[in-house]
Image: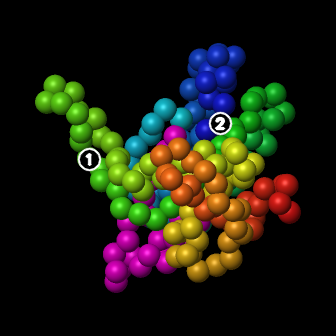
Amino acid sequence: MRQSTALADRMPLDDFLAMVNDYFESTAGAVLDHGGEVLRFIGDAVIAIFPFEAERRPMADMARAAVATAREAAARIERRNASLAAAAHEPIRYGISLHVGSVLYGNIGTNDRLEFSVVGPAANEVVRLESLCKTLGATLVASERFAALYPEEMIYLGAHPVAGLEKGLEAHTLPDFRPEASV
């Protein structure tokens, strides 16, 4: 979710929490409805996976499910924003990133304080991709690996430097999420 710190500062706390929960219902709800697994809520972010199994859940099918989820989440947020616009409520702004890779998840920490988390290069890369949404003015950004796997059209948005990756990341989006400037 975009600008959550600023929103929290200027909105009544109950309204802000309702907005965050609307966002999670829209995004995490779409993940669950399309066969994904919500691993974690981190502040104003949802981390979800679409695990594949060679026979039962092939990678291309899971990529399609992730795209269907992104489209459904966007539609839910759009409906929420439209219904609340008349009451002068702030719209939810957000970014979605799609990537393919392995992650480790489970309880980490100390014997006295454990927390469920997601770690690994793919987890870091998906966060970097999401930050490109803002930079590129795109609601959805997918990695080169995701674009290579996804069997339908994607729009190339170029290679971009990102923190922690010497070669940066190549970014793609779906035609229906194309940034206005690149139409």
Q: Which residue is drawn at 70% across and 67% down?
A: 156
Furthest residue in direction front, as rendered: 166
Residue 119 shows in this picture: yes
Number of other residues with Cα within 10 Å of mark 2, as a class: few under 14, some 14 to 19, many 20 or more: few
Residue 135 lies, with reference to residue 51, above or below; the image says above
SS for callout 1: strand
N-term mark: 2 or 1: 2
Q: Which residue is drawn at 68% across and 71% down?
A: 154
The answer to whether 29 appears left or right of 104 in the picture is right
Residue 114, position as x, y percentages in the image: 23, 33
The answer to whether 22 appears left or right of 174 in the picture is left
Q: Name the residue under label 1.
A: 106
**What is the quadrant of the N terminus in the image?**
top right
The kind of residue tagged 1 is: Gly
Q: Which mark is residue 130?
A: none
Q: Which residue is drawn at 49% across and 32% down?
A: 43
Q: Distance between the residues labelled 2 and 1?
A: 27 Å
Q: Are the residues flagged by discs 2 and 1 in contact, CB closer than 8 Å?
A: no
Residue 12, position as x, y percentages in the image: 65, 16
Whether the magenta-drawn stretch holds residue 12 is answered as no
